[in-house]
Image (cartoon, grey):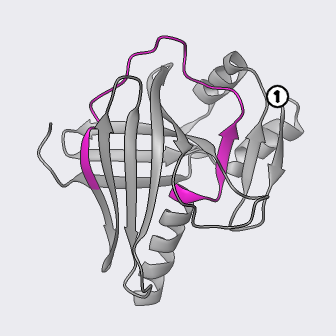
Amino acid sequence: MANTIMRRLALAATLLVAGCFVEPEKTIVEPGAAIDRRPEGVWVYTEGRGFIALAIVADDDALRVDLIRYEPEKPRIVHNRFRVRTTRIAAADYFEAEHLGPHLFWSPDTLVRKFVARYELASADRLALAFPGVSAIEAAVRDGRLAGVSHGGAWERAVRLGSDAATLRAHLAAMPSADYPNKLVFRRASPEP
């Protein structure tokens, strides 16, 4: 049981920090888009004795996100920082995150600098992040619907997309929920700002 919990927590941290990401070269955020300040606060995802905490603060042009991960079996706490811009595509909200801080993985060919995730604030105390499935995006690249290239291995896969912003936005809007298989639900750990 403890090993299963730790594997799930490691997968969650991997998804949030390095692997299995859709990495757009062009922004999906429309020029002049306002920042969605609703995610501001401290959010925690727990499983077993481990956790991932997100401290989210808005500034003039983006959200600043500090991610802290703790696993009882590891001797250290992992910290990463992101600059996140928000956008609405069709009826869904999206994060476009740019990695700013130390990276968990040191392999330059799998280093992900930017990724997208759909987010939902179902209530004042619940933040869900859903990541587009790499397999669905790879299929769109193979079929010619998106321009891009896959890189990395089984645990550190990513698809770097070169399609223009309008094409990326249209594709994300058309993706069914099943194509967002990796979902993490965080609970608010602080009062709303």
Q: Taking 96 as reference, is 120 left or right?
A: left
Q: Is residue 83 magenta?
A: no
- In the image, residue 53 sits, relative to residue 171, either above or below, namely below
Q: Residue 131, position in %: x, y?
A: 55, 47
Q: 35 or 163: nearer the eye?
A: 35
The answer to whether residue 2 is seen in the rendering is yes
Kind of residue at disc 1: Arg
Q: Is residue 21 magenta?
A: yes
Q: How many marks?
A: 1
Q: Image point 55% across, 15% down: which residue?
A: 30
- In the image, residue 31 sits, relative to residue 137, either above or below, namely above
Q: How many other residues sit within 10 Å of disc 1, few (<14), some (14-19) or many (≥20)?
A: some
Instruction: Report helix, strand or loop for mark 1.
Output: loop
Instruction: Check the picture and name the quadrant holding the N terminus.
Output: bottom left
Q: 109 or 182: nearer the eye?
A: 109
Residue 33 occupies quadrant: top left
Residue 2 occupies quadrant: bottom left
Q: Residue 103, position in %: x, y?
A: 57, 61
Span colored in magenta: 16-43
Which residue is under mark 1? 145
